Amino acid sequence: MIRNLIFALLILTGAGFLSSCAGNSENKNAEQEDELALPDSLTGEAPLKLSEEIIGDVIQNISSPVEMANLIKSTGVDFSQQILNNPENISNYSTSFKRALNLGVFSAGLGYINSYDKSNIVVSYLLAVKNLADGIRVGQFFDFESLKRMASNSSNLDSLMQMSVSSFNQMDSYLRQQNRSNVSALVITGAWVEGLYIASSVIEKTNDEELINRLGEQKEIVDILYIILQNYEQNSSFKMLIDHLSELKTLYKEVKITKEVGEPKTIEQDGMLIIVQAEASHVEISPETLGTIIEKIKEIRADVVE
Amino acid sequence: MRKLIFTLLLLVGVGFSGAYAQCNHEALLKDALTQMGDGQYIKDFIVDLKNEKNGGESGTVKYSVILNSRSQYKFNVVNGAGNSEKVHMQLYDGDKLLVSNKAQGKMYSAFGFVCRSTKVYSLVFSFPEGSEGCARAVLSLQRQFAAGEGGF
């Protein structure tokens, strides 16, 4: 009886070994696609130029969906769902790379939807976020049922946004703790690109000075993001993104940012001390440069969401 | 044997309850969000400084934050119930101190910052005289200034 059992086990083990060998080459692509699910150190993409700590430190709030969305709403332009990525597109994102990037894209979309109080469409975007997060094994940070309950009442939209942003922050910390800052970098890049894409679409309609300034100020951010992404240049998918950012960086060289140093001011408001920064920066960007930067942002975004 | 297991369980139980009594980060975050006021939540920061990690000194914890020009932010912090000293929160631009929650010898629970230059800033937390403790801070956006408003 025991002999038969051992024999059967040996056959099964052998068959398993053979099938795993046979399937090795077929699975190679799938493994490459899923390698973002592994810590950087296991994928041969351990950051060389920046440590996990430094990357994590820098990328924590590179793109706040709240800030950009507020600025867009203040232009007075109407909400346009057509600007946003369609939640139905998530079925096209079969790799961890695409899922992480578009998780960022949808987070920026959520910020935009929230700032316009569009509770009627927010659930489908939350569901897209949840599905993409599940796809890169960080779905545990998004309590979809609670978020959905909050979304059903438009007066809860601020709390909903707070909870969503907090979930993103927790997810980001977790990814960095797990040495998966490559995934974190992609989420942040996706959110940043989408924020700029929405802002660019609004600039084209309104020529709003505030938004143009904000777009110009991204000269500082594009440099940081470029350095972070360069840590993963061995990955061919990252290479595409790095090349895009390199071209954007070149275009941003035409943007002039001047610093003016004054005296800091202290004011008291509702019993709280507020410091007004002494240094002030001014952005100079010509219409031609603005146009080329906007075109490049559109091109990058098209590649991200395709 | 039973006594040994009981003692171990007791020790583990006491250890856990002590740790949680000292610092319940979830409750601290809830308090910090309440104290945030009308602003919009951007990010929160965990402060957990222990002496044993730094040979008797609790040291500092530093976070990088990107703040945008023409924006008014609020940084508010809530101290752990077991803290012997209140947490010191400072905002730096490189190595230049911009603002601190300590003024005239008093530790405040919040400060505001009107940013006029978009870049990476550092938020640094520490406890006076190297004491240990925990805290939770929240960064919120209070206001965005339009051109010509608030001196912009």
Image (cartoon, rainbow, N blue to C red):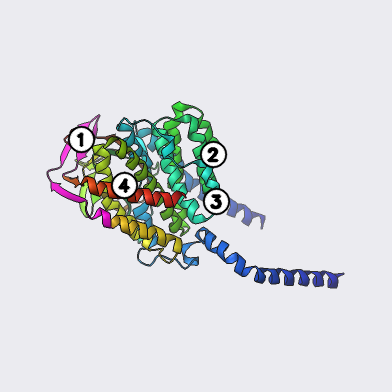
Answer whether labels 2 and 3 touch (C-beta < 8 Å): no
Q: CA distance from mark 3 to mark 1?
A: 43 Å
x 16%, y 44%: residue: A278
Answer whether labels 3 and 1 touch (C-beta < 8 Å): no
Q: CA distance from mark 2 to mark 3?
A: 15 Å
| Residues at marks 4 and 1 on the same chain | no
Quarter of the image for residue B69 reads: top left
User: The disc numbered 4 marks a residue on which chain?
Assistant: A
Q: CA distance from mark 4 to mark 3?
A: 31 Å
Q: CA distance from mark 4 to mark 2?
A: 34 Å
Residue that mark 4 sits on: A294
Quarter of the image for residue A79 reads: top left
**Residue A124 in picture, x, y percent from top left:** 52, 37
- Which amino acid, mark 1? Ala
**Residue B49 in picture, x, y percent from top left:** 37, 52
Could you say which is closer to the camera, residue A224 or residue A146?
A224
Could you say which is closer to the camera, residue B127 or residue A262?
A262
SS label for mark 4: helix
Residue that mark 1 sits on: B147
- Which amino acid, mark 3? Gly
| Residues at marks 3 and 1 on the same chain | no
Which is more N-terminal, label 3 or label 4? 3
Residue that mark 3 sits on: A135
B8 above or below A282?
A: below
Please state the extent of the stretch shown in magenta in the rendering.
A250-278
Observer-side mark, 2 or 3, equals 3
Residue that mark 2 sits on: A144
In this picture, residue A283 sits left or right of residue A84 = left
Residue B91 visible somewhere in the drawing: no
Q: CA distance from mark 4 to mark 1?
A: 22 Å
Observer-side mark, 4 or 3, equals 4
- Which amino acid, mark 2? Phe
